[in-house]
Image (cartoon, grey):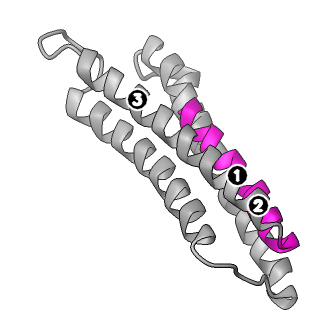
Amino acid sequence: MDRVAACVHEIRALFDALKKGDFALLESLSTKISDLEHKADLAKNEIRNHLPKSLFLPIDRGHLLEMLECQDEIADHMEDLAIILTLRPLVFKPEFEGIFFKFLEKNIETFGWARKINQELDELLESTFGGIEAEKV
């Protein structure tokens, strides 16, 4: 999830570059996001390849892989968005700017909450899905 977060946190800078019309920076950030997404893919594959099939896990292996896939999709979408913005020069409409950046911040905030929940799962597993940790998550 940390690798995915690295992709998500570059999106704000990507749209700032678009707003300023700095297409060289936009291209550079797009490349950086693609590299970060690739690192997220490598981490995902490492987890998948080394996740034991016969070992008892505190949660279903399929659910763990599904959660990993959801995380991967977020990074994939960040890369897709970055690439799309480089396909041709776009002009950011000033009347659209305010509402768009509020929307962008809300999406980044939502991702932050999802990341926090993901981090809390570790503590939840230790408490065997009960008590204060279960309530918090």
Q: Which residue is mark 3?
A: 42
The magenta span reads 1-21
From the viewer's perspective, is 98 left or right of 12? right
Q: Quadrant of the C terminus?
A: top right
Q: Which residue is mark 1?
A: 28
Give, as a three-letter code, the residue at label 3.
Leu
- The quadrant in which residue 12 appears is bottom right
Q: Which residue is mark 2?
A: 24
Packing grade of label 2 (10 A; few <14, some 14-19, many >=20) is few
Residue 133 in sight in this render:
yes
- What is the CA distance from the residue labelled 3 to the residue labelled 2? 27 Å
Residue 137 in sight in this render:
no
From the viewer's perspective, is 111 left or right of 19? left
- Please tell me which of labels 3 and 2 falls first in the chain: 2
- Please tell me which of labels 1 and 3 falls first in the chain: 1
**CB within 8 Å, label 2 to label 1:** yes
- The quadrant in which residue 66 appears is top left
From the viewer's perspective, is 121 left or right of 58? right
x then y, percent, for residue 132 = 58, 23
Q: Please tell me which residue lies in front, 45 or 53.
A: 45
x then y, percent, for residue 48 = 27, 25
Q: Is residue 41 magenta?
A: no
Label 3: element kind: helix
Label 2: element kind: helix
Going 83% across and 80% down the picture, which residue do you hit? 97
